[in-house]
Image: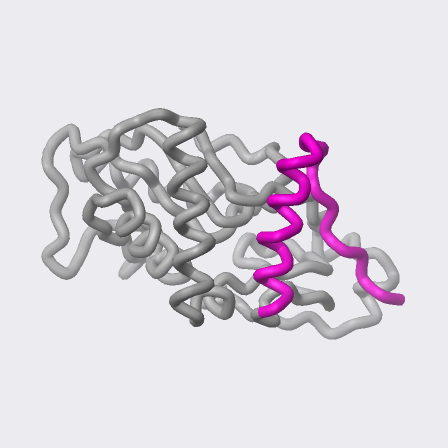
């Protein structure tokens, strides 16, 4: 049985066309995958969006992050001092979005399981930070990155991502601007639909667990 395509959340016709154009960029890059995927959250899905592949073309990445930056400014209307991303998958997205916004970009790492600044990165006390993700699924990693920004003395005033696959249900505690919002069902590994249970799971992301 063919896994279902992700469905877009209800939008205006113009917004729906814009979102389809973004998904077509993923399809053209071979970055919208279908099968049986093990996500970093431990949940399973029939749909995986591989942002690393879509960002390997600098021109395509520039188009997508330029559109994301413009949407952030339109929706959040905020002035940011810094873009901060969780490593590893969001580093390039955060860098390119920061370039489009005209601010610096840094990233958080997990050397011991929790996010922290390394490599000499610093942020000024009260720096207004935009947390930039590649894909938001449950929002857990995003919330952890936002907490780390605050622990480092920054002010997390907003968030952005290329893909919000929660259908708008993920709560990060700050305004979230996604370039595309889709609904891609998630499944507990002990309660899989038959079509997924029949396919061996693969883990295409950067994290082993």
Q: Nearer the viewer, residue 128 or 78?
A: 78
Q: Position of residue 10 (x, y in %)?
A: 72, 33
Q: Decide whether residue 6 is among the magenta residues.
A: yes
What range of the chain is rendered magenta? Answer: 1-28
Assign the N terminus to one quadrant of the image: bottom right
Q: Is residue 164 above or below residue 29?
A: above
Q: Nearer the viewer, residue 157 or 204?
A: 157
Query: 176 left or right of 48?
Result: left
Point 18% across, 39% down: residue: 152
Q: Decide whether residue 9 is among the magenta residues.
A: yes
Q: Visible in this render: residue 207?
A: no
Residue farthest to the front? 14
Numbered circles on residues, count: 0
Query: 73 left or right of 126?
Result: right
Point 38% across, 42% down: residue: 69
Point 60% across, 41% down: residue: 181
Q: Is residue 163 above or below residue 47?
A: above
Colouring of the image: one colour
Q: Position of residue 13 (x, y in %)?
A: 70, 35
> Which image quadrant is residue 76 in?
top left
Query: 108 left or right of 206?
Result: left
Q: Position of residue 184 (x, y in %)?
A: 69, 49
Q: Nearer the viewer, residue 42 or 196?
A: 196
> Which image quadrant is residue 193 in?
bottom right
Query: 32 left or right of 119?
Result: right
Q: Position of residue 170 (x, y in %)?
A: 55, 35
Point 60% across, 34% down: residue: 168
Q: Visible in this render: residue 67?
A: yes
């Amino acid at each position: 049985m063919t896994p279902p395509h992700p469905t877009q959340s209800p939008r205006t016709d113009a917004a729906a066309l814009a979102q389809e154009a973004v998904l077509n960029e993923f399809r053209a890059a071979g970055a919208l995958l279908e099968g049986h995927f093990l996500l970093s959250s431990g949940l399973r899905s029939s749909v995986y969006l591989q942002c690393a592949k879509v960002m390997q073309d600098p021109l395509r990445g520039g188009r997508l992050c330029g559109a994301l930056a413009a949407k952030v400014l339109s929706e959040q209307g905020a002035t940011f001092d810094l873009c901060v991303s969780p490593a590893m998958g969001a580093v390039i997205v955060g860098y390119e979005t920061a370039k489009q916004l005209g601010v610096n970009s840094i990233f958080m790492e997990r050397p011991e399981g929790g996010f922290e600044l390394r490599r000499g990165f610093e942020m000024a006390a009260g720096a207004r930070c935009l947390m930039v993700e590649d894909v938001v699924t449950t929002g857990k990693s995003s919330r952890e990155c936002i907490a780390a920004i605050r622990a480092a003395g920054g002010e997390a005033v907003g968030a952005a991502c290329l893909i919000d696959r929660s259908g708008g249900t993920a709560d990060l505690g700050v305004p979230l601007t996604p370039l595309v919002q889709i609904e891609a069902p998630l499944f507990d590994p002990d309660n899989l639909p038959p079509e997924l249970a029949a396919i061996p799971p693969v883990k295409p992301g950067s994290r082993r667990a």
